[in-house]
Every structure is written in C-alpha cells, then in structure tokens.
Image (cartoon, helix red, strand yellow):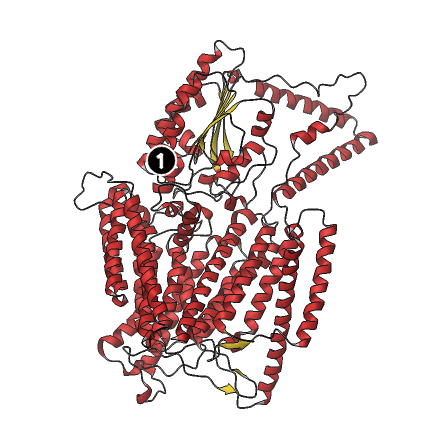
C-alpha cells in the first residue's frame, strides 16, 4: 500500500502519542491506598501482655474543643515571617513572637499545585506527580486522611473556599460554600464569599471543625506577581480575618473546659513571577502556625530535657567504657547499630515505594511502541524525502501475515503471564481483553512493518552498491549543522542542568544557524557559483523546491537528501543594490533580534531571578512605557500580517488588535490615551470575547478559502490566501493571550519569518526538509523567548481565562496550552503557509510533515529511555518529570500540526 509522506507521518505520530500516553500512565506513580477505617475496625485488637490493661477500646480524650484551619493559598513564608509580615500582618506577627503559638517553616514537596498539596496536608503522605494533571478536575480522595477520620468520629465539619475540597471530600461537610479556584482574574469576591459566613458561624456552637481556603492571594500572584501593591492589601485583609477568628475563639474559651486550635497554613508558595508548581525556595517554603492558649510559653522545658538526655547518654558511654572487655556489650552494640541501619533502610524503602510505585509493564509497552515508530520513521527517510514523497508500506504479504500472528501470540502469552503473576496493579492488566488484545496487535503490526522496511532498505542498499551510476549525496555544511545540533540537543537532556537551562541550548543552536546562513550567503555572493545566467532566480521570483533527484529505476526508490531535493544553484551573484545588501544583512538582523529577545525574559533556574526588560516594563512605574510598547507592537503586527489577507480579514484583524489593547487597558495592564486616572473600565470579559469572535471569523474565512481552493480552477490563489488567513487568526489569538510586555516576542517572530522568507529561503533555495528543521528550531527558541522553561511554575495560568467569567475546563485548557506553545505553533503554521504559497511542488508539505514528525519523535523517544534509566534519580520529580510532561504535551501539539499538514497537503494535491 502506497502512502504519502504526510499521511504516513501523521499516522505514525498519532500512534506515538498513544505510546507516550501509555508510558506516562505507567511512569507517574499512583499513591498507595491506605486501608479504610472499616477494614481496621474489622480486625480484632492486639492481645495485651500479662498483667496489663488494654486501651484499644477507649478513644483518647480530645485536646481541643474546636479546630479552625485557615489556609491561604500561595502564602509564602516571607509574607508572614519577613518584612511584609511585620508591615501588613501585625497581629499574626505578634502571635508568632509573643503569643501562645508554635510557628514553623513548612516545606512543600513538588509539584507545588493546590490539589496535591491539600492531599499532602490531610493525609501526611507525599503526593503523586500525576496529580498535576488531576488538579484540573480533582477526583474524590480515597486515602486515609484527617477529614474522613473526623467525619467518621462524628465531628461536624464546615467548609468555605476553594471547591477543590468539595471534590476531594464529597458528603463530608454539614455546611459548605465553594468558590471557583481557576478563575484567576477575581481576587476580591473569591475571598469575600468566604469571609461573609464568619460572623454567623463563629457565634454558633454546632460545629467542631471549620476549614477556610482563601484564594485571592494566589490569584493576585498569577495576575501581577509577588511585588504587586495588591499583595500588601490582601495580607492585611487576611490578618484582620485571623484576628477576628482568634478573638472569637478566645472569648468562647472563658466558658469552655477545653481550648481551641487555630491553624494558619498554606498549600504552596509563590515564585518571583507569581506562579507555582516547581521546587524553588519561594514555592516550597510556607508558614505553619499553630495558635492556641494551650501553647503558653514556659521557661525552657525542652532545653532542660535535652540537657538531661545528654547526661544520660554520657552515663551510658561511661559504663560502656568501663566494661570495654565485655564481649556481651560489644555484641550488643553491634546488634543495636545493625537494628538502627535496618530500620532506616526499611523506612527509606517504604517511603520510596510510596512515592515511586512505577507500573513497569505499561512503561515497557509504551516505550516499545514509541521506539518502533521512531525506527520506522528513520527507515522511511529515503522514500519519504524523495521528490515523489511516497513510500510503500507492506501490510498484506504472506510472510508478514505469518509473522504477525506469531508475534501476536507471543505477546498475548506474555501479557497473560505478567497479569497473572504481577504483585502490584498494572494499567494494561486492568483493561478489558479486547482492549489489551488491540494493544498487542498494534505492537505486532508495528514490528512487522519495521522488519519489512528494514529488509527493503538492506536489499535496496545492495542494489545501489552494484550500480556505479549512483553516488551518495554529499552533505552540505548546513545539513551537518542540523544533524549535529539535533543529536547534541538530545544528548544534553541527560543532564539535569541542561534541562533546567535548555533555553541556552536552543539560543546557541539558533545563533549558530544564523552564522551558518551568513557564511552560506557570503560565499554565494562573493565567491560565486556554477549557475548559468538563464537559471538564476531573483529575490522577487518564486521559490521552487521541486527539482527532482536522480532516480534508480532498478532500486525503485529515490536517493535521499536532507533537503528532499537537489537544490538549483542560487542567484545571489546576480543581485544588485538594496536587495543584495538586505540578503547579506538578514542573518545579522535575525541574530540581533534573537539577542534582544533574550533580554526580555530571564528564564531557567540559575538566572531567572535576575532583572530583565520584562520586570522593568511590568513595574507600576513604567505603565506608560509599557502602553506605548504594546500599541506599537500591535500596529507592527498588523503591518506584518495583513499583506496577504483578504479585505474582510484585514478589517477583522485591525479591529481584533484594537480589541486586544482595549482588553489589556480594561484590566489595568496598559493605559487608554484618554484615561489618566488609572481606573479599570471593566474586567475585560466583553473586550476579550469580541477578540475571540474576530479570531473565529478569520479562521472561518481561511477555512472557507481552503475548501474553495479544491472546487475552482484558480485554487492556488484561494489556497494561499486561506492558509495565510488561518495563520493570521492564530497570530491574533496569540496577541490576545500574550501579556503586554511579551508582545515584542510576537512582533520579532513575524519579522524574522518575513526576513527569512524573502531574503534567505527563497534566494538560497533551501529544500523543504531544511526549511522545516529551521522552523522547528526557531519555534523551540521562541518557546523560551516567551519566558517559558521546563519549570511548571512558568506556565501562565491566567491565559486560560481570558474572556471567561467562570471556569470552563475545555476552553481554559485549550487557551492555556496555546499560550504556552505559541512559539512552536506559529512557526509551524508559517511553515505551512510558506510551503503552500512559495513552492510549486505538490509534495513539499508531505516532506515537511514527515521531517517535523521525525525531528519531534527523536527527542521524545530518547527521553523516554533516559527517564526510565533515571527513575530513581535525586531530581526525577523536580527536573526530569516536568520535562517529560512538556515533551508529552509537545508531541500532542505536533500530532495536531501533522494532521493539519496532511489536510493542507491533500488540499494542495486536489487543487
């Protein structure tokens, strides 16, 4: 069966996504379920020793009459124990320094997001890393926890705040009022809805446990960071709430026999950018303050006990030294030491198993599927990158059928053996038999196709070696750079430091690429080439990547070249005047743009705390400068994008960009020219929804033109306009989701795309594969130019709620994912528009789709093997696992892009 390169690559990448999903399901551990209380009650109590009385049937007397847990989301330890605490939380500071309290700095283990940290607080166990995904839709908590135990003991629990508690503990609260935790634009009503219940509840005596979860501080952090003046006002508000609760509890204690307990805590901290999710000091250090009259300060009892322990220890050492010739004491000492070591080893192993309960079977099956796809893609390179961009996929030969059934039978036997002998739970074993059989058949089919492709490659290589007319193509310097850079990047992922600072790798590769292009440009302009005048192509003419390679009719497949074609001689020697100087200057201008973008957002770990242009622009003292920059950026964006759009799309784009500025002005990020009092006009929901409407309208017009191109004879023009309109719609959406200081990233992206198209790719006549790899490299670099990193805390949560007045899971996840991967998506979208409009080859998009799938599959496959071997590494959860999530999400985005490539290629073929 013959398939186009694009269709084949899209099918491969979809299968690879399934394999990665299966691997992730096995890699990220599920927490160990503790036995329920009913199971414990069914067991008989232990028999007491002779002469002793059993106390198993008696509950210990309560230490406190009431317990109030006040959890302030994203409360950092320095907000309470630092200078901000002294300034904005004076009552809390007084209780810490002089009152009846015990205060601690609690360390939150990553991932530092709300739902896993709540689970850690109530269960006392470490959360699973997969809870990062479950945070968006929390399931009921089935592990043993204090809330469930309190309910089982007959305690009446009241809750107000983050509705995550209500999802974790359904039917646990006698009274509750939940607030949406994901609508980060609201930091006022989300806390007022909690505090409005306090006066009524504190006067009542029909409850024992009160849980309050305040979200406003976390939302302020996501919106404007920890240096915002809103932080101080919110801390003062929280201090007054704590004072109200504590005063009420103290007044009740005068008539009660038991004291009450007030707990001030937090689920996680807040990074310097206002986000959270990773393991920086600002994100993991949180305050834990226990306030009660039972904690009255007494003169130094702990110190005296420590001195007594030292004295007793000295006595034991003296006795041991006096009996130094006693073999009994020596053996006893060895035995005690061995028992200590055994106990520590057992505890450490128990904790590690609880944190890292890997499903090795699912990991192995998922990794095999991913590696089979990568091998198949590598073996298919010669045919997929030929000028036909087609390849033969063997699916029905007798040998294939026999091998397929044999491999399926073996895998099925292994599956039954593993599932019947595995001690732990395996995800694949929990699937139904038809579903598990489908997985085994998929693995078998992939293996057979790989073996068939390998056999054909070996036979073809032998034929080529007998035919002297064929010679292996010589790699250019640019091809060598692409290969070495791709392999070097994959190898760098084996070190945690290179993962934390991966942006430096991509900055280096992009800069090196610019220098290589500069070298190629200067060599063609000043040293000349072997082209004939009649074959020379000027910058204004079209890019043609369809020159065929030599074909071996006996072999039946084409000679591979990274560019996918044999490039015609360039025409740089014929250029004159400004065109020639622009071609010579373009690599340097691109290099300068990249250097400016590096100064906009500091990212990574080592230098993330250093000041950058983004911090300077977002400070309250430079709002005017930020407003001017945002306006200029939006105007430049319109100038760069509108040139190929239809008149209707141009009008929609202009109004949409104006709506973007109005939205940012409405929420207070920038200033209106006529608004000097800095008052917010609205929450920006209406303005953002108008922009969303313009985005959908532009995308609709582009899709209509693409469909129209299949039905008319002049379909090439409609296809060109349609693909560009789709690209412009994505640009408008990116402008809406980007924060104002990041709009220059969008402008420079469009500017570099324009310069590279007009002055690099067209005159130098790079092949489709080379252009694809360059787009991929720039897309990765712009992922980090946005300020992203492999740290979960850099994900802009607020982008998922632009235009929403309530939490809607699917739109929020889509907007958040698009805002995170805007760089790769826009560069991939531009690749489609470039190959659709600047080439006359019908197979350019197919080759591009194949190259894009291959270059994305290579690091994903290698990284799966890497994290499997490093699954017990010290930084597996803080460094390697977040990167694995990013790679998995990037592969999912790549699959969507490959499907889009394939659809565009089909449109191109039909038209």
Q: Which residue is mark 1?
A: 187
Q: Is residue 440 above or below residue 377?
A: above
| Number of residue marks | 1
Report the side of 19 relative to 821 (left or right).
Answer: right
Q: Quadrant of the C terminus?
A: bottom left
Q: Mark 1, residues whose alpha carbon is within 10 Å: few (<14), some, or many (≥20)?
A: many
Quadrant in the picture for residue 50: top right
Q: Secondary structure at mark 1?
A: loop
Q: Position of residue 396 (x, y in %)?
A: 63, 74
Front residue of 236/478: it is 236
The residue at the point 44 percent across, 12 percent down is: 251
The residue at the point 27 percent across, 62 percent down is: 649
Q: Position of residue 719 (x, y in %)?
A: 34, 70
Front residue of 41/213: it is 41
Front residue of 12/881: it is 12
Q: Quadrant of the N terminus?
A: bottom right
**Residue 909 seen from this side:** yes
Q: Is residue 650 above or below residue 333?
A: below
**Residue 875 seen from this side:** no
The residue at the point 45 percent across, 71 percent down is: 481
Quadrant in the picture for residue 57: top right
Hey, which residue is sitting farthest bottom in the picture? 468
The residue at the point 27 percent across, 80 percent down is: 575
Q: Position of residue 66 (x, y in %)?
A: 51, 19
Quadrant in the picture for residue 459: bottom right
Hey, which residue is sitting farthest front in the picture? 711
Front residue of 910/576: it is 910
């Amino acid at each position: 069966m013959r398939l186009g390169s694009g269709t084949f690559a899209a099918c491969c990448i979809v299968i690879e996504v399934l394999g990665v999903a299966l691997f992730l399901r096995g890699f990220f551990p599920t927490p160990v379920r503790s036995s329920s209380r009913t199971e414990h009650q069914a067991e008989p109590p232990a028999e007491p020793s002779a002469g002793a009385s059993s106390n198993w049937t008696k509950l210990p007397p309560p230490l406190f009459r009431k317990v109030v847990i006040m959890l302030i989301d994203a409360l950092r330890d320095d907000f309470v124990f630092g200078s901000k605490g002294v300034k904005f939380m004076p009552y809390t500071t007084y209780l810490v320094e002089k009152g009846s309290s015990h205060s601690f700095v609690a360390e939150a283990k990553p991932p530092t997001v709300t739902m896993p940290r709540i689970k850690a607080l109530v269960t006392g166990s470490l959360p699973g890393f997969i809870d990062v995904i479950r945070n968006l839709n929390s399931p009921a908590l089935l592990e043993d926890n204090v809330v469930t135990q309190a309910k089982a003991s007959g305690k009446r629990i009241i809750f107000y705040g983050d509705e995550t508690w209500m999802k974790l503990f359904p039917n646990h609260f006698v009274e509750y009022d939940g607030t949406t935790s994901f609508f980060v634009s609201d930091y006022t009503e989300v806390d007022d809805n909690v505090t409005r219940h306090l006066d009524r509840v504190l006067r009542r005596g029909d409850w024992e446990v009160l849980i309050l979860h305040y979200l406003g501080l976390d939302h302020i952090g996501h919106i404007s960071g920890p240096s915002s003046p809103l932080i101080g006002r919110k801390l003062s508000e929280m201090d007054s709430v704590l004072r109200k609760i504590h005063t009420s509890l103290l007044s009740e204690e005068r008539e009660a026999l038991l004291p009450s307990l007030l707990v001030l805590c937090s689920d996680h901290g807040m990074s310097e950018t206002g986000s959270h999710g990773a393991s920086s000091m600002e994100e993991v250090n949180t305050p834990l303050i226990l306030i009660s009259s039972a904690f009255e300060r007494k003169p130094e009892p702990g110190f005296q006990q420590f001195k007594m322990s030292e004295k007793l220890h000295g006595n034991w050492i003296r006795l041991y030294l006096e009996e130094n010739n006693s073999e009994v004491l020596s053996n006893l000492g060895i035995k005690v030491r061995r028992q200590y070591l055994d106990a520590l080893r057992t505890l450490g192993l128990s904790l590690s198993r609880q944190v890292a309960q890997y499903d090795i079977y699912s990991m192995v099956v998922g990794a095999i599927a991913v590696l089979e796809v990568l091998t198949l893609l590598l073996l298919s390179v010669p045919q997929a990158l030929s000028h036909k961009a087609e390849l033969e996929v063997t699916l029905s030969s007798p040998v294939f059928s026999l091998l397929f059934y044999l491999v399926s039978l073996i895998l099925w036997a292994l599956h039954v053996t593993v599932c019947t002998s595995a001690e732990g739970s395996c995800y694949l074993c929990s699937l139904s038999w038809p579903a598990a059989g489908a997985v085994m058949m998929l693995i078998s089919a992939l293996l057979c196709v790989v073996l068939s492709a390998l056999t054909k490659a070996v036979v073809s290589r032998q034929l080529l070696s007998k035919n002297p007319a064929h010679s292996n193509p010589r790699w250019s310097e640019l091809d060598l750079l692409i290969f070495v850079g791709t392999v070097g990047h994959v190898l760098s992922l084996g070190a945690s430091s290179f993962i934390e600072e991966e942006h430096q790798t991509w900055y280096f590769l992009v800069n090196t690429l610019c220098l290589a292009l500069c070298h190629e440009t200067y060599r063609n302009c000043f040293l000349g080439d072997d082209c004939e005048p009649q074959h020379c192509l000027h910058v204004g003419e079209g890019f043609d990547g369809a020159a065929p390679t030599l074909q071996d009719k006996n072999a039946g497949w084409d000679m591979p070249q990274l560019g996918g074609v044999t490039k015609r001689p360039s025409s740089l020697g014929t250029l004159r005047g400004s065109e020639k100087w622009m071609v010579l200057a373009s690599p340097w201008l691109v290099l300068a743009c990249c250097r400016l973008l590096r100064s906009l957002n500091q990212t990574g770990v080592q230098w993330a705390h250093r000041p950058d242009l983004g911090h300077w622009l977002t400070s309250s003292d430079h709002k005017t400068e930020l407003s001017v920059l945002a306006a200029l950026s939006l105007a430049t964006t319109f100038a760069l994008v509108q040139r190929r759009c239809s008149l209707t799309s141009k009008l929609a784009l202009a109004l949409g960009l104006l709506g973007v500025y109005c939205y940012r002005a409405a929420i207070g990020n920038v200033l209106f020219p006529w608004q000097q009092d800095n008052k917010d006009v609205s929450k920006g929901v209406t303005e953002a929804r108008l922009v969303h409407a313009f985005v959908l309208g532009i995308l609709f017009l582009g899709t209509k033109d693409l469909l129209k191109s299949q039905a008319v004879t002049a379909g090439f023009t409609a296809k060109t306009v349609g693909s560009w309109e789709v690209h412009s719609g994505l640009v408008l959406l990116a402008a809406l989701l980007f924060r104002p200081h990041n709009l220059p990233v969008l402008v420079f992206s469009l500017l570099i795309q324009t310069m590279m198209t007009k002055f690099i790719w067209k005159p130098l006549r790079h092949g489709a594969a080379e252009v694809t790899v360059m787009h991929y490299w720039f897309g990765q670099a712009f992922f980090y130019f946005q300020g992203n990193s492999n740290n979960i805390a850099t994900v802009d949560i607020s982008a998922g709620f632009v235009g929403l007045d309530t939490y809607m899971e699917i739109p929020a996840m889509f907007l958040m994912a698009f805002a995170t991967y805007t760089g790769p998506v826009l560069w991939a979208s531009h690749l489609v528009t470039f190959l659709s409009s600047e080439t006359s080859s019908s197979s350019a998009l197919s080759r591009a789709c194949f190259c894009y799938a291959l270059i994305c599959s290579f690091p994903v496959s290698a990284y799966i093997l890497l994290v499997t071997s490093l699954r017990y590494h010290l930084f597996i959860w803080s460094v390697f696992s977040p990167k694995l999530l990013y790679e998995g999400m990037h592969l999912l985005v790549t699959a969507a892009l490959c499907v889009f490539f394939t659809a565009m290629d089909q449109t191109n073929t039909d038209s």
